[in-house]
Amino acid sequence: MKKSKMQVLLVFATALTLMATAFTGCAKKDAAPTAGGDQTVTEEATATDTATGETTADAATSEAATETKADGVALKIAIVTSPSGVDDGSFNQDNYNGVLKFIEENPNSTVTPVNEPTGDTAAAVQAVANIVADYDVIVCPGFQFAGISSIALENPDKKFILIDSDPAAQGDQTEFDNIYAMTFAEQESGFFAGMAAALESTSGKVAVVNGVAYPSNVNYQYGFESGVNYVNALYDKKVEFIELPAYAGTDVTNANVGGNYVGSFADEATGKVVGKALIDEGCDIIFVAAGASGNGVFTAAKEAKGVKVIGCDVDQYDDGANGDSNVVLTSALKVMSINVERALNAVKDGSFKGQNVLLQANTDSTGYVSTEGRQQLSADTISKLNEAYELVKAGTIVPASNFNGITSDAFPGLPEK
C-alpha cells in the first residue's frame, strides 16, 4: 500500500492532471482556530471579511479589496482559491483569515480574493498566471496549484505562498526562491482524532469519511487508523475502524488505500449515504474530512441517535448544533491561518525564503480542540490526548501517512501488545 517518495515523484506530474480540487475541510465554520496540545485560540473573522467581495479568475484585476488606513508596509496580495471560495467555512477560509490577520496589523496592505470557478488543475495555474503581474504576493491554497512553479520561475520578483503541496518540479529543481510551500502532517491531527474516537466510542466501531484520496486526505485516514491502534494497544481496547469496500479510495499512485471516500469534496448527498451506511454498520463516532461532502455525514449523524462526529481542519463545533444538543465530539486541526500570516510577515520584514516545509505539532500547526465548551471529550480522554500530543511533538510517536513508508499497525511509538 505504501510507496517511496521517489515513486511518488515519478507519478506526480501525471497525478496533477487528474486533480479537480484539493481542500480537505469539513462543514461550515466561521472561526479559524490555532492549536497546540490542550490549547485552542479562535481568531474570528471580522465584519470586513465579506466587504472585500470576490472576483472570478477571468475578471480579476489589481483592484484592492481593503482600504489603505495607515502608513507602513503596502503589499498587494491576491488569494486564488478553488470554486468554494474564501468563505467556504474551512480550508480556504482558514487561509484567508491568515491574510486578513496580516492586513489587520498592516492596514496599508490589500487583498483581492480570486475564485477559480472550475477546480481544474490547468485552470488553477492559468488563473495565477492571469493575475501575477498585478500583485506582490499570491496565496494559493490547494494541491491543484502545484504547477505554479513555472510561473514563479518566469516572475522572480513575485512571492508565492503555496498551501498543501510542494511545487511541481521543473527539471531537477524542486524548491524555488520565491515559493514558500507548506504541507502539513495531517496524520498527526488524524492520530488525535483516532485516539479520541477509540477512547469515547461505546459501540466499539468508528470510521473516517474522506473526500478524495489526495495525499492530505490519505494522511488523515492513516493517522486516524494509527490513533485507534494506539489506544487499542495501550489501553487494551478492541475498537474497530469500519471500511465500506464500495467506497475504498485510490491515491495519486493508483494504490487502493481502503477507507471511505465520497469521491468528491462537494457531494453532500453521497456524503450522507456514506455516513448513514457507517452508522448502520454500528459506528457511533465518525471523523469527517470531506469538504462540503462532509455536511451530509453531519446530517446523517444528526438524524441518528447516539452518534458523534469529529470535525476537521477548523473548529466545527457550531456546525454540530442539533436542537438543544450537539453532535461534534471535537475537531482535528490543521492550522493554516497562522502560518500564512507568518509567511506574509516574512515578506514584509525581508526574511522570506523560498522553501518546502512540513509543518507539525512542534510549530503548533496540528492538534485538536480541547477548549471547554467547544468539545464533548471526557477529562480522562483529554488527559490521554495531551500526553500523546507531547509524544507526537517530540517525535516519539510517528503516525502513518500516505508516503512516510510506515503503516498504521506498525509505527514508531505503537506499544507492543
Image (cartoon, helix red, strand yellow):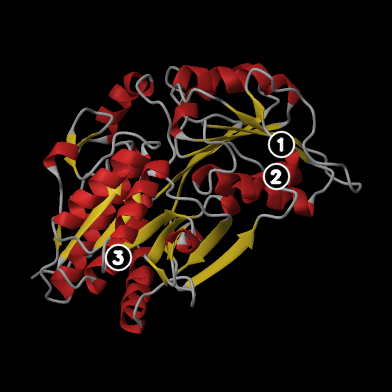
Query: Can you see residue 217?
Result: yes
Residue nearest the viewer, comparing 177 with 165: 165
226 up-or-down from 386: above or below? above
Task: Give the crowd class for mark 2: few <14, some 14-19, many >=20 residues within 10 Å.
Answer: few
Query: Can you see residue 404?
Result: no
Q: Is residue 52 left or right of residue 144?
A: right
Q: Secondary structure at mark 3?
A: loop
Residue at coordinates 52% horizontally, 36% vertically from top-left? 84
**Residue designated by label 2:** 50
Give me the disc on residue 396: 3
N-term-proximal mark, 3 vs 2: 2
Mark 1 residue type:
Gly
Residue at coordinates 72% horizontally, 20% vertically from top-left? 133
Give me the disc on residue 53: 1
Q: Secondary structure at mark 2?
A: helix
Residue at coordinates 30% horizontally, 68% vertically from top-left? 196
Q: Is residue 326 left or right of residue 92?
A: left
Mark 2 residue type:
Thr
Residue 375 at x, y percent in the picture: 42, 71
Q: Is residue 22 left or right of residue 71?
A: left
N-term-proximal mark, 1 vs 3: 1
Instruction: Report how far apart the C-alphas of labels 1 and 2 lie in the structure.
Output: 6 Å
Residue 71 at x, y percent in the picture: 91, 47
Residue at coordinates 54% horizontally, 60% vertically from top-left? 33
